[in-house]
Image: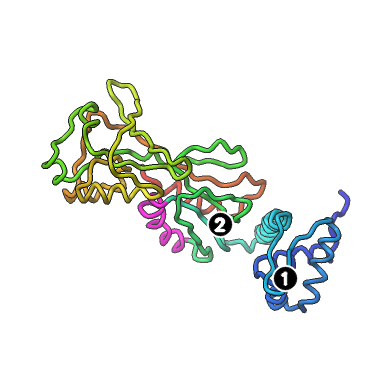
Amino acid sequence: MNRQFDDVMLGSIELFCLAAEQGSFTAAAAVASVTPAAVSRSISRLEERLGVRLFTRTTRQMRLTEAGRGYFEQCRQALNQLVEAEREASGHQVAPSGLLRISAPTTYGHYRLLPLLPGFRERFPAVKVEVNVSNRNIDFAEEGYDLAIRARATADSSLVSRLLEDTPLVVVASPDYLQRYGTPSTLDELQAHECIQFELPSSGRAIPWLFRRDGQELELQTSGGYACSDDVTAGATLARHGAGVFQAYRFVVEEDLRAGRLVELLQDFGGRSRPHGLLYPHRRFVPLRVRAFVDYLLGERPA
């Protein structure tokens, strides 16, 4: 195997990553205990080797170019893998460490993931956890996330997908709403009720409600005067305050059901669920902190 990088070039790559992370040559120089001029020379050396600009610089700010962002993500992963490999080979990686970045949807984040994180950090205190709780689709390469949890399957072959749970769905309404408008006992009767809609942010379309009738799975398009997007808990809150009927994940409304604030409806047509899965990039070398978290989360998932 021919040598591709000398010590100077490897050092330049490290300084480039530091500059990208710190947002300035001066800050990178302080962290690396070198001069800003040394950082600037290293970046110029890389740009000359690659034949592209890695940063755009003005008197007020510095930012990565499109080529620079892609190069940074690849270099950061490679350097992290080198550090992990060295620790494992030397026997120093007794426990997982480093920053673990996770993206999770609002409902699963609040009701499932976040309650488990203190237990994970108690077991692995050297791992710092950063969680983005939102329903937007993140880009692993562009944004540097290690893991994501999603409610729908992905066709992306570059990602590993592990099922966390099939999440049961229930239809609910408040006692006050049912007293005023009656209790639907069939799917046909449901169509005459105020059905709170949840719209997918990606398409703006209301998602169909899922049922099972006579052993057959079916999707039902409902209608109503209320629509929510981005956060499913908004629909549950509306239902709790008498706005109408709503289909939600059971884990979102189970405390309301126990307390009597909501009533489960149409149980004869229930039994449907949606999967929640754990996603992370295919890598030849998966960092120990990622492997530890995957094993932990799969071990703690609901039976």
Residue 110 shows which numbered tag? none
Whole-percent x and y of residue 285?
Answer: 65, 49
Whole-percent x and y of residue 268?
Answer: 22, 29
Q: Residues within 10 Å of mark 2 (few under 14, many from 20)?
A: many
Label 1 sits on what residue type?
Thr
Q: Is residue 85 visible?
A: no
Whole-percent x and y of residue 20?
Answer: 68, 65
**Residue occupying the point 56% across, 47% down:** 280
Q: CA distance from mark 2 to mark 1?
A: 38 Å
Q: Please identify the quadrant where the C terminus is shown.
A: top left
Q: Residue furthest front?
A: 225
Whole-percent x and y of residue 103?
Answer: 50, 53
**Residue occupying the point 40% across, 56% down:** 116
Closest to the observer: 25 or 229?
229
Check whether the beta carbons of the residues at disc 2 and disc 1 lie within 8 A of each other. no
Q: Majority secondary structure of the magenta segment?
A: helix
Q: Which residues are magenta?
A: 106-123
Label 2 sits on what residue type?
Arg
Q: Earlier in the sequence, mark 2 or mark 1?
A: 1
Whether residue 282 is situated above or below residue 208 in the rendered picture: below
Q: Label 1's element?
A: loop
Closest to the observer: 287 or 169?
169
**Residue occupying the point 63% across, 64% down:** 92
Q: Label 2's element?
A: helix
Residue that carries the numbered disc 2 in the rendered image: 289
Q: Residue furthest right?
A: 2
Residue that carries the numbered disc 1 in the rendered image: 58
Apparent side of residue 274 relative to residue 247 in the rendered image (left or right): right
**How many numbered circles are shown?**
2
Q: Residues within 10 Å of mark 1 (few under 14, many from 20)?
A: few
